[in-house]
Structures are given as structure tokens and as C-alpha cells.
Amino acid sequence: MKNWICETCGTQFDAAAAPPAHCPICEDERQYVGWNGQRWTTLEDLRRDHNNRIEDDAGVIGIGTVPGFAISQRALLLQTAAGNVLWDCITLLDDATRAEVARLGGIDAIAISHPHFYSGMVEWSHAFGGVPIYLHEADREWVMRRDGSIVHWSGESREILPGVTLLRLGGHFPGGTVLHWADGADGAGALFVGDIIAVVQDRRSVSFMYSFPNLIPLPAAEVQRIAAAVEPYAFERVYGGWWGLNVLQAAKAAVRRSAERYQRAIERGSAARADDAAMTPTKWQS
């Protein structure tokens, strides 16, 4: 029996004698099946030709796999006064990674933004004493490896350690979650977002999508709701889901400004469609 891993999204599944017939996460319209079809691997095979890069990413410890695997995200280890939190997750966990994370203080809790980052979360929990994995209950159906360490929390917010609060924003997934660390960014506050709020390439702004690989946008009203949900929290920085994709100053203003920009773009598109409709001759016009 093996815990098979989808090569496209990196999610580990319940133990089985043979690989699953399909990956529901990849078959969902927010993700995709790889161009070469559904493929599977195992943690043992992954360890043979991959390792993890562990280094500072703008003041927080980042952990990412080399060469890149699945969607190539990196996890972040938040070293707080009340304990360490692994924010988001990656698939690969090996002895070197376990030893280095232990040297950095270990892990007291794991919290994950959405199903595309569930990856090897159960392996990580077990390696550090069965620490709780906080997932919003609205995304329960996407858990492919079930385990007693998973805590399906409900509501709009949950403090998991003093000063460390999970916020359900929805959008990309119904349970889409970000993490607010009040003491992050040297006490100015930091928001950890995965791609529920996506840091874009200029690293001065963010965006919002229902599906990133398939380019399906969110309604403007949903983006307004997401921006309003983080407005009460102080944060100078936003940490995205990949190396270096962080807004390092005035991040709260960047989120507000980006949401307004998104709304303007959607409104321009709506106005253009209305103009086109008004200019299209009906069948009885000459």
C-alpha cells in the first residue's frame, strides 16, 4: 500500500495498492490534468531526484523543492513568539528537511490556504508529532489523504496561536484562507495569502482569480468582499505563494488599490460589451 502522489498538483492520496484512477483536484476547472495525462509518483521516488531549498524569503524562512515539482510553490515557516507555524505546504519531506526544520524550532501548527497546496500535509504533521493541520471546512471535499491531525475549522476567522489568525476569504475556493501575523514584518503586521490574494509580477500589486491556469476571473463584487474582509487588519507586507512574490511595503494600500483597479477593469469590459450590443444591427435594420 502506497500514498500515491499526483505529479501535476502534488497532492498525496490515501494509501492504496494501485494509483487512483484520477485526481479530482486536477480534473476540477480551477486546475488541469497534465499534458501527458494523469501521472503518479510516491514520496520515496520523489526523494531520489529532488531536495528542498530552505532559506530566507524577505524575513521568513521559505521551503521549496528543487527542481520544481507540481505547481512549484514554497511553504513558509513562521517563527512566532508562541510557536512555529508552517504556512501552506509542499509535497517533499526528507531527512535533511526534517532536521533543519527541527533546528529552527520545529512546527507547532500547519495552516493551508486552499486545496492546491494540501500536497504532503499529513507527512509533515506526522514528522513533527502529529501537529494540527488547520483547513477550512468549506473545502473538506478536497482532502485526498484523510487523517486525525486535520482540524476542519468553521466561521470567518480563527486564532491558532496568539497573534496568528486565519481568515476565510473564499474566492479561489469557498474555504480560501489567508493568515494574519500581527507581529510579522517587525511588528507592522504581515498577511500570508498563497494565491487567494495573488501577488503579481510587479510585486507592488495583487490580483484575484477563480482559476489561474485557466484564466477564469472572479466577479467584481467578490473581489470587493475579499478586500473588505482584510481591511480591519494591519499589515505592511503580503507574502505570496512562490519565491520572491511578496509585497514588501505598504501592502495594505496595495490590496485596496488592486481591488479598485480590478473593479474598474471589469466595469470597462461591461461597458464595452454594452456598447457593442447597442451597435449591432438587428435583423430588421438595414
Image (cartoon, rainbow, N blue to C red):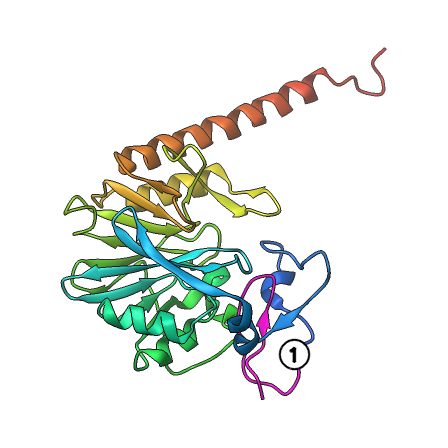
Question: What span is colored magenta in the figure?
Answer: 1-19
Quadrant into which the C terminus falls: top right
Query: Which secondary structure dominates the residues rendered in magenta?
Result: loop
181 up-or-down from 231: above or below: below
126 up-or-down from 194: above or below: below
Image coords of residue 269 (percent x, y): 57, 26
Q: Would you identify the image quadrant in which residue 136 lies? A: bottom left
**Res 152 seen here:** no
- Horizontal side of residue 92 vs 211, given as left or right: left
Quadrant into which the N terminus falls: bottom right
Of 280 and 211, nearer the camera is: 211
Magenta-span inclusion, residue 4: yes
Q: Which residue, given by chain and number where applicable, does mark 1 sit on?
A: 19
Secondary structure under the numbered disc 1 in the rendered image: loop
Magenta-span inclusion, residue 210: no
Which three-letter amino acid code belongs to the residue tagged 1?
Answer: Pro
What is the count of numbered marks? 1
- Horizontal side of residue 156 vs 11, given as left or right: left
Image coords of residue 257 (percent x, y): 35, 30
**Res 269 seen here:** yes
221 up-or-down from 114: above or below: above
Image coords of residue 264 (percent x, y): 46, 26
Q: Would you identify the image quadrant in which residue 86 lies? A: bottom left
